Amino acid sequence: MISQKRSIKVFSGNANPKLAADICAAIGTSLSQNEVKGFADGEVSCSIYESVRGSDVFIVQSTCKPVNDNLMELLIMIDACRRASAGRVTAVIPYFGYARQDRKSRSRDPISAKLVANMLAAAGADRVLTMDLHAAQIQGFFDIPADNLLSYPLFADYYAKKFGSALRDMVVVSPDVGPIARARKFAETLEAGLAIVDRRQDSPDKAETMNIIGDVKGRDCILFADIVDTAETVVSAAKALAEVGGAKKVYACATHGVLSGNAIELLEKSNIEQLALLDTIPAHPKSAQARLHYLTVAPLFGEAIERSYQEISITKFVF
């Protein structure tokens, strides 16, 4: 539990107040009082209702949809705390929006992840605490300390309890070649096999083909991703595992459930037995019908916040 030797304040924006309250419960403190609202024209207004002078301030705010509104809330809250003489301000961003815009894919493209990193520092944040950045190199975009917590130990614990010794006969699958390093760590932790869904589209007018790299025939699989947005990638990968690879059952897990568009409908019709998500983004209201199961990140973020507050290393959470 947090000692009272110096002041700590945990504030929440409107993105995920339940998670902020759960984090406070995990560390044995109360959510600090503030209000974030908007003017009639859409401008964001922030009021801090208690002193933060000299305090170690943590602002919990995922930049999920509506992304720009939540990002502006976070920036304005940081500015408010900095102008109120907070001792240190940490932006706790369980889901870091714009992380998929981490490089120039074409000429004249922006690198929006870098822009957001600059904005957080300019607003007055002293450090950032986030989870499973889409690309690990985004940590280098920040000119302030940025800690990237890893989610796979949470999923490993969940599946170890769910499947027990049967895990050794299962296969962890990366839905694309990009996140293979993350999937490999997860597979090693579970002592399970590893496979990759190789997605290729030779030309715009040809259908996408999928090959399975690894042996999944007759075995249960766990697809492991960092983000499920439209769900097209994870659903098509699950279908390929069954139809091309001959997998028996397909489960899936992902850190961030963005679930845009008709993602829920796609998941309902898919062959995915269950999709496990973390509550970095609030649970979707139709989670039951889409076979979604949510795990909480509150204890993990709570311990990371407590260690940061007490100036203790959090290395075990980030590597």
Image (spheres, rainbow, N blue to C red):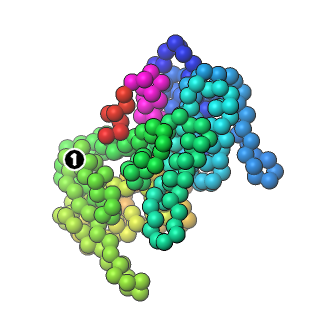
Q: Position of residue 51 (x, y in %)?
A: 68, 22
For image coordinates 26% across by 72% down, the residue present is 211
Quadrant containing the C terminus is top left
Q: Badge 1: few (under 14), some or many (20 or more) residues near its Cα, within 10 Å?
A: few
Is the residue 147 above or below the residue 24 in the image?
below
Q: Position of residue 70 (x, y in %)?
A: 62, 48
Check residue 118 for magenta coloring: no
| Span of residues in magenta | 296-312
Q: In terms of depth relative to the viewer, which is nearer, 200 or 139?
A: 139
Q: Position of residue 206 (x, y in %)?
A: 38, 85
Residue 205 visible in the snapshot:
yes
Residue 167 placement, left or right of 64: left
Q: Position of residue 255 (x, y in %)?
A: 42, 49
Q: Main secondary structure of the magenta part?
A: helix
Residue labelled with disc 1: 188
Check residue 303 for magenta coloring: yes
Residue 166 visible in the snapshot:
no
In the structure shown, which secondary structural element does the residue marked by tag 1 occupy?
helix
Q: In terms of depth relative to the viewer, which is nearer, 114 or 71?
A: 114
For image coordinates 24% across by 69% down, the residue present is 212
Q: Seen from this angle, which residue lies furthest bottom?
A: 205
Residue 232 position by quadrant: bottom left
For image coordinates 63% across by 53% down, the residue present is 68
Please state which amino acid type lies under the numbered disc 1: Glu
